Amino acid sequence: MHWAAEPHRSVFDVQSATRVRQGIVVVTAAVILAALGVALAARGWRPPLLLVIGALLGASLLLSSFGFTSAYRKLLTVGDVSGLAAQLLMLALATILFAPMLAAGEALGRPVVGAIAPFGAQVAIGAFLFGIGMQLAGGCGSGTLFALGGGSARMVVTLLFFCLGSFWASLHFGWWMRLPSLGAISLGASLGWASGVAAQLAVLAALAGLCGWRRARSGARPVFAIFDGAGWRWPLVVGAVALAVLNAATLVVAGHPWSIT
């Protein structure tokens, strides 16, 4: 009796097949986005442009594997500070880009406002509960969306319960807002925009210095590109810059910063 050996597939064959599938997905997504853009065009120029910015935000998150909760998980579990350092860079760039527009109250002749909300007990409780949910689900709001867009079917369940939980909270939103709070705090409004930006950048620089010290102690080297078997991915620093710039674009077009929910 002779057993027919299964043809051996080389790594290059697997990579080629993967690229073909990725190409089909990209083309399909482009067609869907174009159709949505045409449908939204009847409502003016802003919705289609925001659709494009949203797609670019998702692509930036996916291509750079830029995570928010995952950065802290890696920091606490294995001492990896690369994700946190990328977040600090993104926040610093966004601060520099946002400050002039928020100080003027407009951008390109359109009014803009910051995302300022009360800081109180509801934030602490919500952050604790959300942190538990994010660790169990494996992603936050943006992480869930870009992982789902990247093909992670299990994130469908996460997104479903994300929406259900948000809806449930909205039913008693007033009770949460009546909890003890320090009120909304804006460094730009309380210290002046120049001093507020300087103070925020100083804090971010100090935290970045701690990240650099931790990286030096661990002997880790900066990662400029990542090869995952299917292709090259953006380094985290590119993702951080792209997210900051696209967030500023969102502020200009929408009149308020990027938000998920």
Image (cartoon, helix red, strand yellow):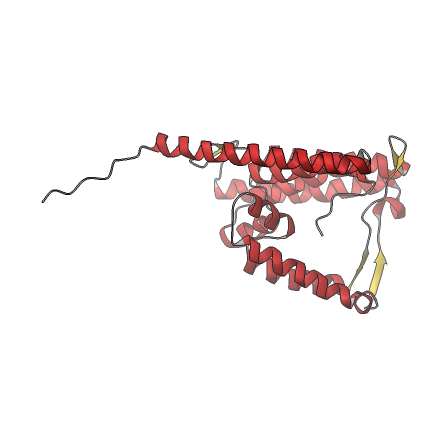
Using the rendered image of the protein, determine whether residue 53 is visible from the camera's viewpoint: no
Where in the figure is residue 15, as x and y percent of width and height? Answer: 40, 32
Query: Seen from this angle, which residue lies furthest left?
Result: 1
Whether residue 87 is visible here, answered yes or no, is yes
Quarter of the image for residue 169 reads bottom right
Quarter the N terminus occupies:
top left
Total numbered labels placed on residues in the image: 0
Name the residue at 61% across, 37% down: 59
Would residue 136 appear left or right of 255 to someone viewing this image?
A: left
Residue beneath the point at 41% across and 33% down: 17
Comparing 193 with 43, the one in front is 43
Q: Along the line of sight, which residue is nearer the eye, 182 or 123?
A: 123
Residue 252: percent from the left, percent from the top?
A: 81, 35
| Image quadrant in which you'd find residue 176 | bottom right
Q: Looking at the image, which residue is at 34% across and 33% down?
A: 11
Give the answer, above or below, for where 82 lies relative to 169: above
Residue 127 pos. (x, y %): 68, 60
